[in-house]
Image (cartoon, grey):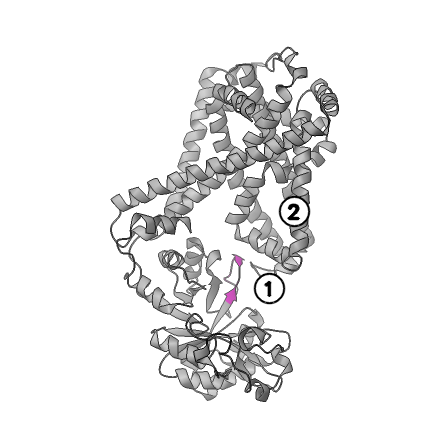
């Protein structure tokens, strides 16, 4: 590894500034284009399907829709072209540095483009195959970062791997191993053909031992790239926390740290992606360029071709430096504008935010029980969220899972047992001994207990065996005169339509595990109850423009609560309503320590 470090320093020091500017420019432009292109393609597919939005309910139809598959394939081809361009560009920089020739951004882009077209023309099929196979290994840092930042990708992977987790893991490992082997030869395909033949003969003669050594070294380089990015990330976070504690007023520091830490996380992800592919390619290039058979050659002159008048003008120092400065200024202006548009409210938390005890406050008492309701009332929650399902004989009881095993220890699906059988079960036995004998309550019992004390968020679960449940729930609410003291939510939008048909006065909420697109056509939902990891400031603004509310679930960590408050959500659903109330009233961490703020930044 020591010879590689020496060779890498020798090559990088010649054109490090050009490489840095190119990687920053390329990453920003490619990420923006990827995001805009993805949004455009998704919207087209949704429109053709007749949807204005994408949720967990219609995700299956969306992902198997032929136009969606077409855009996925097209996106893969575009990514392959982009990777080929980046590899060609970096190799040109390495070659120039090895020959001790200075180069700057416009020339780097021009030569990268030229190399890409030459490669695709020469290897239209084999080259495409190579790039596709090499992408997972060369871009592993960027792919991981992109998945971590894109909730739609996370949801897609969860859906694909939910039933075949082990198989998916094995497949990914095998794919990355194959990708690493093919990545070793990719740079050579972008070299002139005579170099490719020499390299092929050299690697064949060198045997498997050298291949294994080179690949092992590339893994070490990948890990080194992550370490560099992590060290820079931690240093940036600590500097940011120091600045916030010095400049920000008490009560606003947590919000500021949460916002700026996300920007730093974003930048660190981009840096890790750039460092990973650049250092790995540099390692492969050095293994090729520094080998004996190449050292004996006379270095090629990439600029020996006769230049056109346009090329001579564009390669003049004035144009080269002028274009570089223009690109840097334009991207800086774009980034500053994007940051300002997404800047959340850094002021103190709003006391108007409502607090909902999730399943009655599932941390302190058995979920969906009368004891949980009693705790929620004692904790001064504005509302308790409960889940209702239907027994075999039509009784509406509180239960989250379709099976009773997790909460009662009795393994049976709710639609297979009667209310009499449920009355024999203990909903507290698996929570704590002091709750032994806790019954599974009916909806009527909970409404009567909460009347005059607390409102209810009644989530109607869909399990495929309870198509008539909505009518029964609405009747119970009407019989108990609880219409104005409850809301009905569901992940099944058809249930909300049924509620409005039965009683338009009952407020309804659409529960979403993920959300993408325009929700304005969902007229039967009076508010949206969304998993907090999918909520952004822009999403909240868009929903508020519709005159509707955003309820965030399920928040149990103080930093997440503060982040949701800074985005102006209307309701926080939590297992710990007392903590949320303290955060809302500003009773926690008004003057947090350095370590406390750093902890927030790292979450």
Q: Secondary structure at mark 2?
A: helix
Disc on the earlier residue, 2 or 1: 1
Is mark 2 in CB contact (under 8 Å) with mark 1?
no
* Residue at left offset 62%, top offset 27%: 284
- Figure check: 137 above or below 580: above
Q: Which mark is residue 38?
A: none
**Residue 226, relative to residue 190: is it above or below?**
below
What range of the chain is rendered magenta?
A: 511-520
Asked whether 299 or 508 is in front, the reply is 299
The x, y position of residue 27, in whole percent, is 51, 36
From the viewer's perspective, is residue 344 above or below residue 482?
A: above
Q: Position of residue 566 (x, y in %)?
A: 36, 56
| Figure quadrant of the N terminus | top right
In reply to whether residue 513 is colored magenta, the answer given is: yes
Residue 71 drawn above or below residue 371: above
> Which residue is at the front of the view, 505 or 452?
452
Q: CA distance from mark 2 to mark 1?
A: 27 Å
Can the viewer see residue 530 in this picture? Answer: yes
Tag 1's secondary structure?
loop
Q: Is residue 575 left or right of residue 137?
A: left
According to the picture, the residue beneath numbered tag 2 turns out to be 172
Circle 1 residues within 10 Å: few <14, some 14–19, many ≥20: some
Instruction: Report x, y in % for residue 116.
Output: 64, 27
Question: Dot 1 corresponds to which residue?
Answer: 57
Residue 443 horizontal side relative to residue 179, left or right = left
For the residue pair 254 and 312, the one nearer the viewer reads as 254
Q: Residues within 10 Å of mark 2 (few under 14, many from 20)?
A: few
Where, by quadrant of the figure, is residue 552 drawn? Answer: bottom left
Residue at image point 50% right, 22% down: 9
Q: Residue at x 55, y 30 (%)?
A: 279
């Amino acid at each position: 590894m020591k010879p590689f470090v020496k060779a890498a320093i020798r090559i990088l020091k010649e054109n490090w500034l050009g490489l840095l500017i190119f990687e920053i420019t390329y990453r920003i432009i490619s990420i923006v284009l990827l995001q805009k292109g993805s949004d455009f393609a998704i919207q087209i597919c949704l429109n053709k399907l007749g949807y204005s939005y994408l949720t967990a309910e219609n995700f299956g139809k969306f992902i198997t829709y032929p136009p969606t598959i077409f855009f996925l394939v097209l996106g893969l081809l575009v990514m392959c072209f982009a990777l080929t361009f980046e590899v060609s560009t970096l190799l040109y920089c390495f070659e120039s540095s090895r020959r001790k020739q200075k180069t700057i951004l416009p020339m780097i882009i021009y030569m990268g483009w030229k190399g890409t077209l030459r490669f695709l023309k020469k290897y239209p099929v084999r080259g495409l195959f190579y790039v596709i196979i090499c992408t997972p290994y060369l871009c592993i840092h960027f792919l991981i970062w992109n998945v971590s930042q894109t909730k739609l990708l996370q949801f897609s992977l969860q859906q694909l791997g939910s039933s075949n987790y082990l198989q998916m893991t094995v497949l990914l490992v095998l794919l990355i191993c194959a990708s690493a082997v093919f990545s070793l030869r990719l740079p050579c395909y972008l070299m002139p053909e005579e170099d490719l033949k020499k390299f092929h003969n050299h690697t064949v003669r060198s045997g498997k031992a050298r291949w294994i050594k080179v690949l092992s070294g590339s893994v070490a380089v990948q890990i080194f790239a992550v370490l560099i990015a992590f060290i820079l990330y931690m240093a940036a976070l600590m500097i940011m926390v120091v600045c916030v504690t010095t400049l920000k007023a008490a009560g606003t520091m947590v919000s500021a740290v949460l916002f700026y830490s996300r920007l730093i996380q974003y930048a660190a992800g981009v840096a890790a992606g750039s460092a990973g592919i650049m250092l790995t390619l540099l390692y492969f290039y050095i293994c090729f360029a520094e080998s004996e058979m190449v050292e004996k050659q006379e270095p090629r002159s990439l600029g020996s071709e006769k230049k056109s008048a346009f090329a001579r003008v564009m390669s003049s120092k004035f144009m080269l430096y002028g274009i570089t400065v223009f690109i840097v200024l334009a991207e800086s202006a774009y980034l500053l504008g994007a940051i300002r548009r997404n800047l959340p409210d850094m002021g103190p938390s709003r006391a108007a935010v409502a607090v909902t005890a999730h399943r009655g406050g599932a941390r302190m008492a058995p979920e969906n029980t009368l004891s949980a309701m009693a705790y929620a009332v004692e904790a001064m929650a504005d509302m308790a969220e409960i889940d209702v399902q239907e027994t075999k004989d039509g009784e509406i009881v509180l239960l989250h899972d379709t099976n009773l095993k997790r909460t009662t220890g009795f393994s049976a699906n709710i639609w297979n047992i009667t209310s009499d059988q449920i009355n024999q079960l203990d909903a507290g036995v698996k929570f704590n001994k002091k709750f032994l004998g806790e019954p599974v309550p009916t909806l009527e019992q909970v409404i009567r207990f909460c009347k005059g004390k607390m409102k209810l968020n009644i989530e109607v679960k869909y399990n495929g065996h309870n198509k008539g449940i909505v009518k029964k729930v609405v009747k119970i609410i009407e019989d108990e005169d609880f219409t104005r003291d409850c809301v009905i939510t569901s992940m099944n939008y058809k249930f909300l339509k049924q509620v409005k048909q039965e009683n338009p006065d009952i407020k309804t909420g659409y529960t979403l595990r993920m959300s993408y697109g325009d929700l304005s056509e969902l007229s039967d939902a009076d508010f949206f109850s969304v998993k907090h990891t999918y909520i952004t400031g822009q999403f909240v603004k868009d929903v508020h423009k519709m005159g509707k509310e955003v309820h965030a679930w399920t928040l149990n960590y103080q930093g997440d609560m503060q982040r949701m408050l800074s985005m102006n959500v209307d309701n926080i659903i939590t297992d710990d309503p007392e903590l949320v109330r303290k955060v809302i009233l500003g009773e926690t961490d008004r003057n947090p320590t350095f370590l406390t703020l750093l902890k927030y930044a790292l979450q």
